Amino acid sequence: MIEVSEVDDNLKVTATNDERNLTEIFSGETVVNIPLFQREYKWGPKNLKDFWADIDAIIEGSKSSQFLGVVVTVPRPRNMGAPQVFDVVDGQQRLFTCHLAIAAAVRIALDDNRVTWAVDVAKSLLVMRRTSTSPTNIKVIPSAKDRQQFNILWAEIANHPNVKKEGGWGEESFPTPPSPSGSNNGKLLQQYKRIQSLLRSTLQKEGFEAFEARVNVIASKLSLVTISLRDPIAAPIIFERLNSRGEKITTADLVRNEIFARDASDPARASTMFTNYWEPFQQKYEDRNLGVELLLFPYGLTFDPNVTKAELFSKLRNRWSTLGDTTDIIEELDKYSDTLFALEVGDVSGDIPADLKNSLVRLHQANAPSSVYPFVFLGVSAVKEATQAAEDVAEAFSTIESFLVRRAVCGIEPTGLHAVFKGMWNEILADEKYGGKVRASAVADIIRRRTTVTWPNDEAFREAFMREALYKRKICKFVIAQLEIASSGETPEDDFWIEHVLPNKYHADNWGIHFSNEQHAELKDTVGNLLPLTAEMNQVASQNSYENKRIEFNKSMFSTTRNFADKIDEWTPEAIVSRSKEISEWAMSRWPHSLKGTET
């Protein structure tokens, strides 16, 4: 009989109790589930050759055991009376190959009329008792694409004539695989037949004792380390560390698996919903080179402002359990997709209220951190649902923009803002003095309450424009673009380069008459020395003297640059300082401080 025992500590390659053999992994009321739309079984002849070589080495005595690797799983919530189900994140190929090997051994033993042995092995490692809460009693469940093949192999075992002659499986143990889906033929069934051929050859050439010894090696001498994740969101990181050459698992895969888990018993229906709802949803993200994971945390904060990343997935599970259907979950997730696309890539082609499009594009261009996303999600949604006025919400967004721009110009990192924005929407609605209206003044009040969060006042903002190297800050291009809009009244249609009028590299021949080395270093990256230019004109202007640059500037498509060339006859340190001051005065008006005269 099969040896049902733990891995001998002397045979382990790790020092962890989580290194287990198949008899341990497949024992008890435990189901190892490959989520519906996870990749199908992929191993072919070469993988099987390597797998079988390890078994041969143990049989021949050159090895005492073989470590197969790591299986990473995510436990599913368990219902009373139901088996514990673990979704496989990584390791499905090697684990499923072991299952196929035991199943092939059972089939061959039945063909050899060793029914008692075959049924005992199946009940120990492959099949559990049937329950009213589970439609299947097989201990390993394949993905949707492999289920038809899985049903074929199990139908041959379950309905084998030799079992029927010996009295059958018993009412509670009759093998019942999940509902069929996918192709009649594929790599899973092909591999199963290859393993059958290898085991049948052993039985015919060496006898049942050698056959049983080989099955014992598969069941008790091959080991895997099993990792069960508390937080499924960590799965992509775990996978990358353990299996960098494998097909990557993504957070989108895990979300998809979780959403469709409720439809595991009806793969045909799940497949229809997958095609009609999930794939179009995910494709929108792939088209923009974005991951669905960008949506999850800010989405979670829209319904629970206190949720942490560590508990996000459990909160999502609870949330989704209250929704009626798989499509309801996808539709709720997708509710904020268009707003996310606006913030992440500046794409406002989706369902965005017209009065908010410019506000969202500016937040994108200003590199708004993801900490503001929950507030923006709820703001756009409220305008679409007509519970807030578009004008009010747009002004609230502009206040956030001013806050972020002032901090960025002053070199303040966008850290520590999560606490400001995560519950801001609900905080405003809950305060009676705002009358349920989300307006700019309310946003300013909430920021002011966070005494540890700096909102630079006019003095600090002006000083940054006068002294700081704006060119080296991410906000620089946005400031220059907004200056161009103020000058021309139009948004620059083409991308642009930022030109140093006083060149980035100091050349005394062209510039030494007005600028010392020290003045060059001090002033070259300040806002007064910066202009928008096309890439081609930027190359032409390059290190030239101001007289030659001025000729090129007059040809520029940018109003800011043409006006500059028209007005400035000579470029000196005093001229740079003067222009920086002029721009700072404009900027203080463009991004006003709602709390004049203070610095919070």
Image (tube, rainbow, N blue to C red):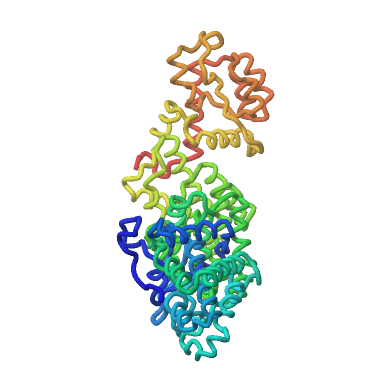
- Asked whether 130 or 403 is in front, the reply is 130
Q: Is residue 344 left or right of residue 455?
A: right
Q: Is residue 100 left or right of residue 242?
A: right
Residue 223 sits in which quadrant? bottom left
Residue drawn at (53%, 66%) of the image = 332
Quarter occupied by the C terminus: top left
Residue 520 place in picture, x, y as percent: 47, 17
Residue 520, placed above or below residue 482: above
- Asked whether 192 or 495 is in front, the reply is 192
Query: How many numbered tags mark residues here?
Result: 0
Residue drawn at (58%, 54%) of the image = 285
Residue 3 sits in which quadrant? bottom left
Residue 240 place in picture, x, y as percent: 46, 51
Instruction: Kindly tell me whether residue 159 is visible in this rendering.
Output: yes
Instruction: Kindly tell me whether residue 437 is visible in this rendering.
Output: no
Residue 40, placed above or below residue 585: below
Residue 197 place in picture, x, y as percent: 58, 68
Residue 528 place in picture, x, y as percent: 51, 25
Quarter occupied by the N terminus: bottom left
- Asked whether 258 or 428 is in front, the reply is 258
Residue 364, placed above or below residue 183: above
- Asked whether 59 or 431 is in front, the reply is 59
